[in-house]
Image: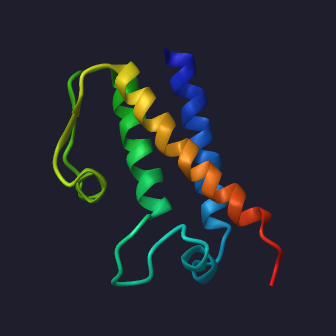
Amino acid sequence: MAMRLRELYDRIEVCRQRYWDIPKGKRIDGGLRPDVGASGYCGDHIINLASELVAKAFRGIFPVEVDSMVGFAIFGEERQFSTANEIFTFVESIIIELETKLVAFEMKPAE
């Protein structure tokens, strides 16, 4: 599991770089973040939550509770994970979604 978590961590960091390489206005237009004061999907929140969870999975102290503001924004409440595998499965799903959104944005013709 440690190797799979490490690979997932690397994917998170690649997403972080790709996300921040996009200018703010284009991230908003591309659906990667909401406009100021609006709600909606936010790639930065996904990246931060994914990083937080993978770091906690590496520590191996369970259960892991997500009680951060980012976690609340995503789950609407506190969330608990009992195993590294639970964290891996959840984080991989949200990173796949972010990767898909980044690819869709990058495939759009430049204006």
Please say if 30 is above or below 91. Answer: below
Position of 24 compared to 21: left or right? left
Q: Position of residue 33 (x, y in %)?
A: 48, 70
Please say if 108 is above or below 73. Answer: below
Position of 8 compared to 63: left or right? right
Q: Position of residue 55 (x, y in %)?
A: 40, 34
What residue lies at 20% left-to-right and 55% top-to-bottom?
76
What residue lies at 51% left-to-right and 25% top-to-bottom?
5
What residue lies at 56% left-to-right and 21% top-to-bottom?
4
Position of 99 compared to 108: left or right? left
Single out the residue that lies furthest toward the top. Answer: 1
What colour scheme has been applied to the protein in the rendered image? rainbow
What residue lies at 56% left-to-right and 52% top-to-bottom?
98
Quarter holding the C terminus?
bottom right
Nearest to the observer: residue 89 or residue 60: 89
Q: Position of residue 60 (x, y in %)?
A: 32, 19
Q: Position of residue 85 (x, y in %)?
A: 40, 20
